[in-house]
Image: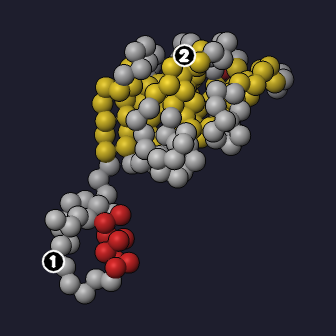
């Protein structure tokens, strides 16, 4: 759910890929947008009301449609561009106060900064996992399941 500029419009999304546009004063649905058939998992509207960002994903790694952000014209619903880079479901979106920056968070444990006008990724933050870069090559007494779990949490074997 995201408010449009001045709070007059409300956007909501669902797992079917629909974005409903509501009049927040009357509660009347104005239109429904369908940028994709994938689940919309995050929404944000720019402070100036020009842009609507819709993040998608299905939580299944790099499978089709996962981790994509659609940038739409918030007034017409017309697609402007698609931002790709996340490897998993987009879980959060926020625009900067000056309307030039979009920040996205994902289940791939990254935060990405996007230049809205160009669609270019301009920065990437990666959250370190608990065992990031711990070398378990010579660790003894680990079951294969424990080894797999440690690797999923960032451990390496060299």
The relative height of residue 147 versus residue 20 in the rendered view (above or below) is below
The relative height of residue 30 versus residue 65 in the rendered view (above or below) is above
Q: How many marks?
A: 2
Q: Residues within 10 Å of mark 1 (few under 14, many from 20)?
A: few
Which residue sits at x=54%, y=42%?
64
The one of 94 and 89 positioned closer to us in this rendering: 89
Kindly identify which numbered label has been placed on residue 138.
1
Which residue sits at x=59%, y=40%?
41
The relative height of residue 103 versus residue 4 in the rendered view (above or below) is below
Residue 101, given in percent of the width and then of the height, sits at 41, 21
Under circle 1, the secondary element is: loop
Q: CA distance from mark 1 to mark 2?
A: 51 Å
Q: Is residue 19 left or right of residue 142?
A: right
Q: Is residue 12 left or right of residue 59?
A: right
Residue 22: in sight, yes or no?
no
Residue 2, given in percent of the width and then of the height, sits at 62, 29
Kindly identify which numbered label has been placed on residue 80.
2
Residue 113: in sight, yes or no?
yes
Question: Quadrant where the C terminus lies?
Answer: bottom left
Under circle 2, the secondary element is: strand
The one of 45 and 126 positioned closer to us in this rendering: 126
Kindly check if marks 1 and 2 are in contact, taking CB atoms under 8 A apart as contact.
Answer: no
Q: Residues within 10 Å of mark 2 (few under 14, many from 20)?
A: some
Which residue sits at x=20%, y=72%?
136
Mark 1 or mark 2: whose residue is earlier in sequence: 2
The relative height of residue 21 versus residue 84 in the rendered view (above or below) is above
Residue 111, given in percent of the width and then of the height, sits at 38, 39
Going by the picture, which residue comes out furthest to the bottom?
141
Question: Quadrant where the N terminus lies?
Answer: top right
Which residue sits at x=51%, y=31%?
69
The one of 51 and 24 positioned closer to us in this rendering: 51
Residue 51, given in percent of the width and then of the height, sits at 55, 17
């Amino acid at each position: 759910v995201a408010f449009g500029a001045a709070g007059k419009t409300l956007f909501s999304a669902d797992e079917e890929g629909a974005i409903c546009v509501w009049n927040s004063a009357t509660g009347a649905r104005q239109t429904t947008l369908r940028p994709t058939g994938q689940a919309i998992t995050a929404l944000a509207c720019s402070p100036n009301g020009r842009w609507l960002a819709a993040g998608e994903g299905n939580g299944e790694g790099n499978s089709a449609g996962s981790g994509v952000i659609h940038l739409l014209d918030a007034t017409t619903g017309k697609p402007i561009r698609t931002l790709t880079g996340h490897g998993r479901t987009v879980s959060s979106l926020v625009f900067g106060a000056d309307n030039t920056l979009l920040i996205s968070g994902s289940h791939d444990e990254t935060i990405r900064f996007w230049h809205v006008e160009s669609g270019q990724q301009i920065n990437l933050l990666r959250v370190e996992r608990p065992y990031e870069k711990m070398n378990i090559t010579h660790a003894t007494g680990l079951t294969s399941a424990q080894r797999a779990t440690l690797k999923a949490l960032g451990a390496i074997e060299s």
